Each structure stands twice: as structure tokens, then as C-alpha cells.
Amino acid sequence: MVQIVDVNGQPLQRDVLAEPQTAKLGWITRDFAQHPSRGLTPKKLYSILEQAEFGDLMAQSDLFVDMEEKDAHLFAEMSKRKRALLTLDWRIVAPANASAEEKRQTAQLQEWFTDLANFDDVLFDCMDAVGHGFSAQEIEWQQLGKVWLPKTLTHRPQRWFRTPFYDGNDLRLRDNSSDGQPLWPFGWLVHKHRAKSGYLTRGGLHRVLAWPYLFKTYSVADLAEFLEIYGLPLRVGKYPAGATKEEKATLLRAVADIGHNAAGIIPEGMLIDFQKAADGSEVPFEAMITWCEKSQSKAILGGTLTSQADGKTSTNALGKTHDGVRRDLLTSDARQVQTSLTAGLCYTVCALNFGAADLRRVPRFEFDTREAEDLELYSTALPKLVAAGVKVPRQWAQDKLMIPEPQDDEEILSVPKPEMALPPEERPDTPPRTAAMRYRAVLTNSAGEECIPISMRSIRRSTVCQPTR
């Protein structure tokens, strides 16, 4: 019997078909986030990022989750990046020069994946790897007859994982050991997204976004504090010599209450002077916030004009240029995700149901990232090129315009005859020609009279003319 192995050559453990791996680590499901974004400082942020480089991903993962929850701009931009993948069509593609059996497997996989429940959620959870560097979904299998198919794919928090100290790319589950527990073969769909080069622990885009997030947090807090006292006069409390600590505390409390409640009491003999109202501007704080948000947009989407217009340099041409950069990112994301889906789903399903599989010959998952060309431009240019003698393959034109090849039983569009393009009431009332119809020669003279020959022999010498009707 041929042994079934995963893409890394690890043999199948039958336990994975009975229950998920995390079921044997029940304590990990009761491990909750610590929210390290509270009281975040540059020193604390540096310590969190450095800790992750040594394999401990808990604090870094918790911080990245907090960043998306607390920063609305960052959440909106990351949501665009993640959900853009859901707009693409996908298909299962057979390998080159596929055999009849490989074509059959491809068609079967296409049917199974189409019927897979919540497959859009699977794609969306894969894109969580853009910020964190990786995304792990645990597979729970079910057997339908003789067929093994995924029942559910559950996204697991990144804080559940770690990497060994000696290998920053080897993702493992946290347990009581120092290096972690290796992931079971056939039990996980792991997508490692390379937002930038480096080890898995440093490959997440959120490591770049953490610093603008920190600076923006400071600026927002300073702006809130400024708005709290903006327009209020400076209050100075004066206490007499010999005042006790309790009297001083009472005066300070009264000065603060007057600023917010416009009322307060102080002991006799104490004074409160109102100086010039608090002065200043919100512009410096907003400038810092704007810089941070633009930096986030550039890092996530490659530009700023697909997020907001600044009213100064934004033009339609620049917007299209920035949108083109975002399209490049979408294509790159799709190619990375489809590689992980081919190895993590297509290969595993084929290996379990069709026997030993070769990753090089397995049907692969593929997104359609093509964009249709300008139909109006091509409809004008192609007829002229063909008339000039340019040999244009029909399949090339259909691929450019993303027009699929019609099936045998499909109706196709056609250009109607000129008279059929008119409304029914304007069409000429001409009966169709039939084989039973008879025709006769008709001559007219200079007066417009119809001349009917008496016989074909006498057509040149004897005719009878009458006015035309």
C-alpha cells in the first residue's frame, strides 16, 4: 500500500481525520489576549517586536489585533486589501498536457470546492496573513461515503503559535515545550504571506504599520487634551500664608471644578484669578495624524488617492495611477494565496481521495486576475487591422476582451439585417421569395408607360403600351 504524505513528505496521521489537533490542547482555547496596546510607548513597542523575533509571537499578535480594532483608518485600508481578493473569479486548472485521469480529478475538485460551505470566509481568513505574516486555519474532516472532504476550516488566532528559536520560518503550536508542537500533516491550511522579505516572524505588514500607529495614538491623545481646555481661561488659585494641605487641596479642586462645571466653592480668604483664555491651534496635531494615515495608506495600498483626496494634488490621472498600483498588489496577493491553496487544499484532498499525489501534477487553484481591454477601442481597431491584412487569431481577441468560447448549445449574438433593425411598422412589406413565384419582363417607354410584349418573338417589333399603375 502506497503511503500518503503531505507536501513536505510527512506521513498522514489518522488521528487528524478523527479530531483537530487543538482538541488535544484544550487549555489553549482558554488563553485570552493581553492587549499590549494599553500604555504603548516606543520602548515597549521595540520590546514586543524584538520578542517576536525570538519566536514568542503572543504580544506581537495581540498588538496587531488591537491596532486594527482601535485605528479606524488602518482597519478600513486593510479591509480593502483583504476583501479585494473576494472580487476575483477562481477555478481549478488541470496541469499541462493533462491525462484523462488528471482532467477527471480537476473536474471533481472544481465541483467539490464550489460546494464547499463558506469558501469566501476561507479566502478572507487567508488574507489575514498580510498583516501578521501568516494565517493558520485548522481543518476538520468529514467522510461522505468514500470521499474525504473538509467539513470546516476554522481560523486560529496567531497568538496560539510560535517558532523555534533556531528557525524563524517553522510555525508550530504553543504547548509546554520550549519549541512548540509541530503542526499535524493534513490538519492545517497555512498561508504565509510575504509582504516583505525576511523570516516569518518579521514578514507581516503590521510591523511596518506599528510605528505610524504609535505616533498617531500620541497625536490623537494630545489633540483630545487640547480640545478639552481650548477656549477656557487660565485659572490661578491663591491661598494665604499658613494654609494647610487640606485647604490647598480644596482650592485646587475648586479651580478644576470651575473650569468644567462653571461653579465651585473656596474658603474665605482665598482667591481665584482668571487669566487669558487658553490659546493655540489644532493644526499641528492634525498634520501629524494626516502624515500617519498617509503612511499607512502607502504601506497597505501603495498610494493615498484611492483612500482620500487632499484637494491639492489629487487628479483623475493620479488617481488612476494609484489604482493601478493597488491592482498590482491584488495580483501579487492572488498569486501567493493560490499557491497556498494548491498545496494546502488541492493537494491534500487529492491525496486523501485519489491516492498518492505529485504536487507538480496536481490540479491547481487559480484566480482570474485578467482585466478586460477597452471594448470600444478594440471594436474600432480590429476591423481596420483585419482589413489591412493583419492576421489576428480569434482566440487572442477573445482572451483580450475576456469573452469566453461559446459552448455547442449556447446561443450567440449576431448582427441583424438592416431592415430588421427597423421597428415592425417601418419595415418594408415585401413578401419573401419562393420557388412558386413567376416573373415577367416589363418594359417602359419614354412616357413612363408599361409596355407588355405580345409575344417573346415580337418583343422587338410589336408591343402594347399602357400607363403604369
Image (cartoon, rainbow, N blue to C red):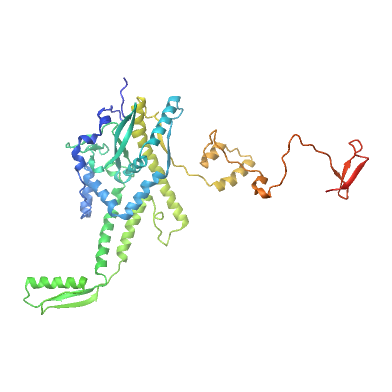
Q: Residue at x 20, y 77 (%)?
A: 274
Q: Can residue 46 be spotted in the picture?
A: yes
Quadrant containing the N terminus is top left
Residue at image position (20%, 71%) is 261
In the rendered image, residue 93, in percent from the top left (x then y), is placed at 43, 33
**Which residue extends farthest top?**
1
Is 467 drawn above or below residue 16 in the view shown? below
Question: In this view of the protein, can residue 299 be seen by the observer?
Answer: no
Q: Is residue 55 above or below residue 361?
A: below
The answer to whether 253 appears left or right of 349 in the picture is left
Which one is in front, 446 or 328?
A: 446
Q: Position of residue 79 (x, y in %)?
A: 35, 49
Residue at left offset 50%, top offset 44%:
372
Q: Quadrant of residue 357?
A: top left
How many numbered marks appear? 0
Q: Residue furthest right?
A: 461
Q: Nearer the viewer, residue 65 or 203?
A: 65
**Residue 165 position in % (x across, y down):** 21, 38
In percent of width and height, residue 219 lies at 27, 61
